[in-house]
Image (spheres, coloured by chain):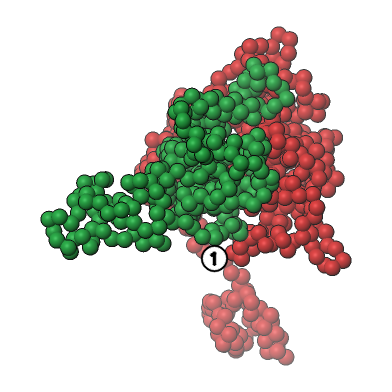
Chain colours: A red, B green
Amino acid sequence: MPQVKIIAKNFIDMVASLPAVKLDMLYANPFICEAILRSLPPLAKKYVLQMMYIDAPIPAKSLEEWVLPDGLSKHRVAIDRLIQLRVLSETVDRKKETSYEMNKKFQINLQKQLIHGGILPREPMASSSVILPSSEELEIYALEQWEHFLLHLISSNQSEKLTNFSSSMMKVFQRGLLSQRDKEASRLTEYGFQFLLMETNAQLWYIIREYIANAEERGVDPANIISFLLELSFHETGQAYNINTLNEVQLNTIKDLSDLGLVKLQQGRKESWFLPTKLATTLSVSLSDTATRKQGYVVVETNFKMYAYSTSKLHCEIMRLFARIEYELPNLIVGAINKESLYNAFDNGITSDQIVSFLQQNAHPRVAEKVPTVPENVTDQIRLWESDLNRVEMAPAQFYDEFPSKDLFEAVCDFAREYGALLWDDSKKMQLVVKGELHNEMREFLRRQKQ
Amino acid sequence: MAPIASKLYTDDVSLVVLLLDTNPYFWTSSSSSSLSFSHFISHVLSFVNSILLLNQLNQVVIIATGHNTCGYIYDSSLSSVSSSISANESSGDAKMPAFCSEVLKSLEDFVKNDESLSSVDAGNGVGSSLLSGSLSMALCYVQRVFRTGPLHPQPRILCLHGSPDGPEQYVAVMNSIFSAQRSMVPVDSCVIGAQHSAFLQQASYITGGVYLKPQYLDGLFQYLSTVFATDLHSRKFIQLPKPVGVDFRASCFCHKNTIDMGYICSVCLSIFCMPHKKCSTCGSEYGQAQSDASTLSGQKRKEPS
């Protein structure tokens, strides 16, 4: 797995990278077609709609007639995206005229959608047979599960409730986030720290991505998982769906997903069912970079004190990344941001911008309305401390010593001075320091002098 | 649970308010012969589906414009999927998609209600429908959406209109158009009747919407999806039909006739087709106490533009 800059943009990029055969298979599923359509740039969406009932290939020239001169770059982006996702296929005929044709399966599936309207992947169970948790309960459940998972991820010994993920699975998730030195306790890597400060959606996406990438090793077709996850996002939050409607792969997947808090599994007397949570249904929303805001909990004061109204251990761990925790009360964590704690964070590869944006995004509702949310003196100081670290610039230099004679030393000094590369010299000890880039010339000069 | 308004919207999320002309006089007249009402509805339903398909946050509201009244037919934000399923079960109609049956049912109720309100002998010729009413309802809805918070879908209004203009609604329609302009809501219009509609031409021209009178009504869906499904963001990049000419004629306030030239009150700008001694709108009296000088200014000619 390459060290991805953690935000691999979205699901659809992953879909686009699938081989053509798999992609065509995916388009047999109407929900995937829908999800793909929704993820397209606005102009591309429009083209798809416009070409929906055109069976013949459309010459590229007539497509270009649709756009104004200003929009030509957007047009290119849209068409490229469509071709990349194999929604359009490009053909060049004998006269070098390019034309596009829409993927037949994709087209037919969407035509059906147009006629029948949005349908659900599966019918929810009648509400009489199951007791549904309220949406708040469900959300709390989802967040709890997710936090458990994260806590387990970063420090396996801390979470009291174990997840069902096998340790090998966990290792896969931890890869890139934790660095394991032999026998030592594992440490978070730079990416690990950045990961913790990201939004839930971005974190979720990272994990899901790893999960899908790992699918092949577990002997599961990634395409199946992708299609199931996309399908899941079309389910309605908080409705119960019978688990018997799933096939075996999906059944295995859903157990893993419940550990992540994407679904809640429940058992009745006869049947068991699953309830998709907000995390699952926003999974496809996050495709279009839509972020959901959580209730924040952090208040930062101008005296660098930080109060976090949270009961979560995870939050405490995150705070500890860049602040000194002073008290942990039942519903409040009090900490202070100071130079040492921040240097610690910077050492771990966290940037000041990440810290500031974390504080802003998770601001307590009371302060969230204020402008600025985090006091300016605090944000400025955080940035100043970071730039403090970058005060010294390193440049290579060469140190010369043990000259045989005073004359030679002086000659060398003059030579270096001529090039403006002499940094320091001590005529008593006959030592000098010269800029690194002049080293070759210096050697040449010394050799000539010796002769 | 975070309310839907707290989501960050991408720039192509739209709220489309559809105004459907359900005027029975129009649909039974010969001018609509190329397109029956049922065909029309099926085109529109597919169009609504396509809008909802494009983005999960898109929202469609359908308002019916009747002869005597207008009313909300459908609001995609209210009908959750589960509720429509239960409605479907109760009607026992499994073949028709829940959304369609819902729309058709409320449309039927609306038409019945509209019929019951009609006076005995309104049926001389093709009556106009209550465009001003449905326009204002649409604008009210949009205003409500604006007030839900800083993040809301981009609203636009689409009039699917066939009946001829009712000159008696001139003032009300113009007022709606100007308030749409003020709140930056484009009014798109698609004329399915025989003649051009001066009201809608002006509405689209003033608010920056698209005015189109399709040549072949059989392909209405293609027109709708090609032109009117374009979100406001993409409109900057796309060739859209340009107005060929706009009929700016006004109706006079006294007899509700459409006129090329007329007299306007210098005080309140009311338009009349013949000179009056006193403005019927604001009550100013012309040319009596002051002599000739004021009669000149009092009876300016309205310039046809």
Rendered residue at 77%/24% (across/down)? A246
Q: Quadrant of the C terminus of chain A?
A: bottom right
Query: What is the chain identity of the residue bearing mark 1?
Result: A
Badge 1 amino acid: Glu
Q: Nearer the viewer, residue A48 or A336?
A: A48
Q: Is residue B278 left or right of residue A68?
A: left
> Residue at position x 60%, y 87% from top?
A415
Residue A75 versus residue A221 in the image, above or below: below
| Image coords of residue A56 (percent x, y) | 80, 52
Q: Residue furthest left?
A: B289
Examine the rendered structure and indicate whether residue A431 appears above or below residue A77: below
- Residue A303 occupies which quadrant of the picture? top left
Reading the image, the residue beneath label 1 is A393
**Element marked by disc 1:** loop
Name the residue nearer the viewer: B263 or A391. B263
Residue B237 placed where, x, y %?
59, 59
Residue B201 seen in the figure: yes
Question: Viewer-proximal residue, A141 or B226?
Answer: B226
Seen as rendered, the residue at the extreme right is: A94
Is disc 1 surrounded by few (<14), some (14 to 19) or many (20+) residues within 10 Å? Answer: few
Please report the residue visible at 51 percent of the width from the left and 49 percent of the height from the top: B197
Q: Vertically, is A382 above or below B137?
A: below
Q: Position of residue A132 (x, y in %)?
A: 60, 17
